[in-house]
Amino acid sequence: MKKVISITLALVMLCLGVVAFADDATPSKTTEDLLTIEAVPATPVEGSNFFFFPVTEKYVDVTKYQANLDFAAAELAKVEKDGAEAYLGEETATAVKAILGSDKVTLDEFFAVVAGNYKEEMGEVTVTVQMATPYKKDQKVAVLVSDGTAWATFEGVGVDDTTGAIQVVLDPATVLKVQEGTGLFAVASNH
């Protein structure tokens, strides 16, 4: 009898946790709640060990990329102080607004990324990211990727209603810039 009650109580707590997560799923500007990221080049090269990861303990040795984390924190502080539109500048903000069909820019996600072992002949890279923000299937998002000096803007899309993941295709020049610079990844949507 105790087992039945314990299992029932555990299931109730699990259900309450899922409901609380769904109601409380708000945008996040850290990688602490980043669930998954996958980057696949159009033409993989055997043995290249290509990677495109957020700077988080799940994926990389964060001590090796402390400068990237510090840079991302400093840039996020600018976003929070000046607002997303002022931070991004008129040209990038206009591109984001065009993708979203909106007159406002709000960044849902903002974090440091690193890339390595990428060669231009690998072609475009499809990046699928599951974050705390619950994006809907086919929902348009603006994905911004920076090498630490300039932003490139891409149209991304929600993959499905279950995971809330987004997918974006990055061009070779952007991936190379992230590999050679201090990479940042941001997502804007009409939440």
Image (cartoon, rainbow, N blue to C red):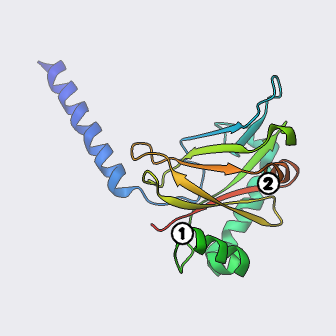
Q: Give me the residue at 29% from left, 37% from top.
A: 14
Q: Which of 2 and 152 is in front in this view?
A: 152
Q: Can residue 119 be seen in this view?
A: no
Give percent across and percent down for residue 108. Answer: 54, 63
> What is the crowding at mark 1: few (fewer than 14 residues within 10 Å), some, or many (at least 20)?
many
Q: Can residue 40 be seen in this view?
A: yes
Question: On the rendered image, what quadrant is the C terminus found in?
Answer: bottom left
Q: Tell me the element at label 1.
A: helix
The answer to whether residue 189 is left or right of residue 151 is left
Q: Looking at numbered disc 2 in the image, what kind of residue is underneath it? A: Thr
User: Which residue occupies the foreground of this view, 32 or 110?
Assistant: 110
Residue 100, by quadrant, is bottom right
Q: Mark 2 points at which residue?
A: 174
Q: Which of marks 2 and 1 is nearer the N terminus?
A: 1
Q: Farthest residue toward the left?
A: 1
What residue appears at the point 82 percent right and 39 percent down from the top-left corner? 116
Q: Is residue 179 left or right of residue 142?
A: right
Mark drawn on residue 168: none
Q: Where is residue 142 in the image (x, y as percent from the top left)?
A: 60, 63
Could you say which is closer to the camera, residue 92 or residue 1? 92
Q: How many labels does the image show?
A: 2
Q: Position of residue 137 (x, y in %)?
A: 43, 50
Q: Position of residue 102 (x, y in %)?
A: 52, 76
Circle 2 — which element? helix
- What amino acid is labelled 1 in the image? Leu
Residue placed under numbered mark 1 in the picture: 100
User: Is the N terminus in the top left, top right, bottom left or bottom right quadrant?
Assistant: top left
- CA neighbours of label 2 inside 10 A, class few (<14), some (14 to 19), many (20+): some
How far apart marks 2 and 1 lie (CA) works out to: 21 Å
Residue 107 vs residue 5, the one in the foreground:
107
